[in-house]
Amino acid sequence: MTATQATVPLLHRFLGIGLIAIGVAAVVLRYFGIGSLPHDEAARVIAYTLSGVAILLLVLAFLVFKPRVPHRAPGQSFEQYWATPEVGAKALPVWFFLEGAGTLAAVAYLFTGEPVAAVTAGLAIAAFWLAGPKQS
């Protein structure tokens, strides 16, 4: 496998590790009370708004951008599939939207502590890993 062939799937792994690190950092910082807003109606509005935007990003990723990613042809190896420049160009926006959704929801949880933001972050992280290079 050449460096070009390994780059796109490896990028997914690094983006996912960073997304998990952001989620863990949000939980740890929230546990210690760092970065949290006062728990009032404004915090709830912020949590629901950011979670809604994160869900919108998830929907865009799966309903608009994921269908554009070409499917692997029968008999085509994993390496051949990812060596095609078109595949990486179409898969990257999906991953970026999913990572953005997870990051946004994790930040919403950090600031507000609302369960809806935590659930949305978990959903986005799971969706990110489910939309990985092995799933194409």
Image (cartoon, grey):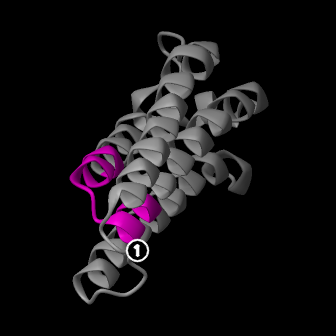
Name the residue located 55 percent from the left edge and 56 percent from the top edge.
10
Q: In the displayed image of the protein, which residue is found farthest to the top?
A: 74
Q: Position of residue 98 (x, y in %)?
A: 51, 41
- Residue 129 seen: yes
Report the side of 82 relative to 123 (left or right): right
Name the residue located 36 percent from the left edge and 73 percent from the top edge.
26
- Check disc 1 and report the residue beneath it: 37
Report the side of 93 relative to 48 (left or right): right
Residue 43, located in which quarter of the rendered image? Answer: bottom left
Q: How many marks?
A: 1
Is residue 115 highlighted in magenta?
yes
Name the residue located 61 percent from the left edge and 44 percent from the top edge.
96
Q: Nearer the viewer, residue 78 or 111?
A: 111
Inspect the image, locate mark 1, and give the three-letter code of the amino acid beneath it. Answer: Leu
Q: Nearer the viewer, residue 35 or 120?
A: 35
In the figure, 35 relative to 12: above or below? below
Report the side of 64 relative to 74 (left or right): right
Looking at the rendering, the stretch of residues picked out in magenta corresponds to: 106-121
Q: Nearer the viewer, residue 80 or 10?
A: 10
